Image (cartoon, rainbow, N blue to C red):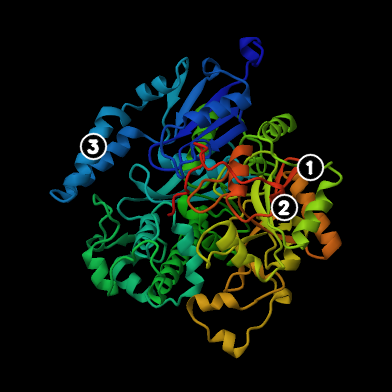
Amino acid sequence: MIAETQPSSRPTHILGLSAFYHDSAACLVRDGRIVAAAQEERFTRKKHDAAFPKHAVEYCLREGRITLAELDTVAFYEKPFLKFDRLLHSYLAYAPRGLKTFLMAIPLWIRERIWMKTLIHEQLPGFTGRILFPEHHESHAASAFFPSPFHEAAFLTVDGVGEWTTTSYGFGRDNKIEMLGELHFPHSLGLLYSAFTYFTGFRVNSGEYKLMGLAPYGEPKYVDLILRELIDLKEDGSFRLNMKYFNYGVGLTMTNAAFDKLFGRGPRKPESKLTQSDMDLARSIQDVTEEIMFRMAKQVRKETGLKHLCLAGGVALNCVANGKILREGIFDRIWIQPAAGDAGGALGAALFAWHQVMGNERKADGVKDSQRGSYLGPEFSREEIHAYLTQNNIPFSELTDAELPEKIADLIKAEKVIGWFYGRMEFGPRALGGRSIIGDAQSPKMQEVMNLKIKFRESFRPFAPSVLRQKVSEWFDLKEESPYMLLVAPVAKARQRAMTVEEQNKFGLEKLLAIRSTIPAVTHVDYSARVQTVAEEHAPMFYRVIKKFDEKYGCPVIINTSFNVRGEPIVCTPEHAYVCFMRTNMDYLLLGNFLVEKREQKPLDQDLNWLKEFELD
């Protein structure tokens, strides 16, 4: 525990919370510094867990070495009464439609969720400090600007919906943010994208990135129809949706019969075969989303006159749209909150309390952000990992720090697939070299192997490249850093391979078969890649492995995908990692400096109560 000091010099501790929609999370801030942050799903193993983040809170307090009694402030990421107001008005506006969901939702809110102060005190016994409730998009904006490297910058936050707001923009300067404009429910870009996610058979709030990955396989056949019938888009990026086609206002589905009629089909049944129509729908809504974000960004630049932009909200995870904004040169630099969705609201709420409410100083040097690579989750010591391995009779070898980079580089070159569990877990949906599965980006077979035999997911899904920061522009058309894997950029022309006429005439998933570059495993069918730049200061061992791979084999790029399988959250503990390793066709597992080889392992005990079938989404 932190020793008691004089009241005047005692650190101020703020706990940020997000909960009860999806991706619940907790974040601890001490005197303005982010100490810890994690999503609840990583501990409960329930993907997108929306429950009160009890386990994430326990971790944050443990990492900060404080008790609940030592917390000064709890900041919850939205205003429950204002959200309840939106729900109630929506049900009244649509009545008598939506009676079923009304009877499901409203009693829970009246009984529990609008009384959030009481609930927080019940969940955090011993906490006696104050509780703050910034608005949902204030939390997003705070998460976008306050950790950014910029002294001043514009911000744009776009998601499904908070209380009433679906999009907001404004600017931050020093230790304050100021809203300049908003769009309100039901007119939501996030919900429009989720409607197409639902319609193409993927799960809402989970499958949007699948829709984005599917888009390059299709043609933009429905763009004009979407812009004519579904959305009235203005030049400044503002819009209104034609709600006669949508059911999300109060219904249990995103779209309705009128939507079906418009597109001449119904929603795809989940897990059924993808059709060209699904791919064309994905491409069309992706193109529309990029156009809306582009227009919004231009308007924000025009109104603020600022040369830097910060992004947050679930739509900011659309790295293709982010890449387009950057390439169009609307802003000189862009910084995107790595936990851009609701999980990041916990971080934003805590920083909003520290800077905006308490008026504390914020320092920005214009170069480095304050999120420290987003490695904000749990870390396990050598002793803890060793104890787990020995207690469970798991064969292993131990590598020194000097041996490790070359050993792993050689395994990658040998086309081995490696579970990489090293240092602190990442905060946000992307694996950044803390909880990753890695492989050889130069291997033409690696994408299929990792999708079907390791991740157990759809074959069309692309993998991301991790590249040494100083060499990114040699391999990708990207001059900026992309430490959080939130920018898509084309593979450099010099690394591309031209398609034959026969390959150019392929349609749909047949496009997968062609090799497009010297790093085919991370090159999508449109020659793009979702790039992560790796810096030694944030992930020294991960950096050293890639550097050694480059020195020995002439390529500073490797595959980096999240350490999980389909339907499962990213692994958090050594146990999670070992179980995932054993239930897939990974060849090796690195737990800290301990290397575990698959062929030396005994089969898992199938009766272990923590070994469950992974849910498919």
Q: Which residue is mark 1?
A: 397
Q: Is residue 573 visible?
A: no
Query: Which element carries disc 1, helix, strand or loop?
Result: strand
Q: In the rendered view, tell whether residue 594 sits above or below residue 215.
A: above
In the rendered image, the residue lying farthest to the left is: 96
Query: Which element carries disc 3, helix, strand or loop?
Result: helix
Picture coordinates of residue 121, whole percent (x, y): 41, 20
Circle nearer the N terminus (3, 2): 3
- Residue 593 lies left or right of residue 212; in this view the side is right
Q: In the rendered view, tell whether residue 35 sits above or below residue 226.
A: above
Query: Which element carries disc 2, helix, strand or loop?
Result: strand
Image marks 2 and 1: residues in contact by CB distance under 8 Å: no
Image marks 3 and 2: residues in contact by CB distance under 8 Å: no
Picture coordinates of residue 110, whole percent (x, y): 25, 30
Which of the pair 511/598 is nearer the observer?
Answer: 598
Picture coordinates of residue 340, whole percent (x, y): 51, 47
Dot 2 surroundings within 10 Å: few (below 14), some, or many (20 or more)?
many
Which of the pair 192/45 is nearer the observer?
Answer: 45
Q: Which residue is mark 3?
A: 106
Of circles 3 and 1, the one toward us is 1
| Residue 438 figure quarter | bottom right
Dot 1 surroundings within 10 Å: few (below 14), some, or many (20 or more)?
few
**Residue at point 69%, 45% (across, down):** 368
- Residue 29 lies left or right of residue 88; in this view the side is right
Circle nearer the N terminus (2, 1): 1
Picture coordinates of residue 463, whole percent (x, y): 60, 62
Report the amino acid beneath label 1.
Ser
Report the amino acid beneath label 3.
Ile
Report the amino acid beneath label 2.
Val
**Residue at point 59%, 44% (across, down):** 604
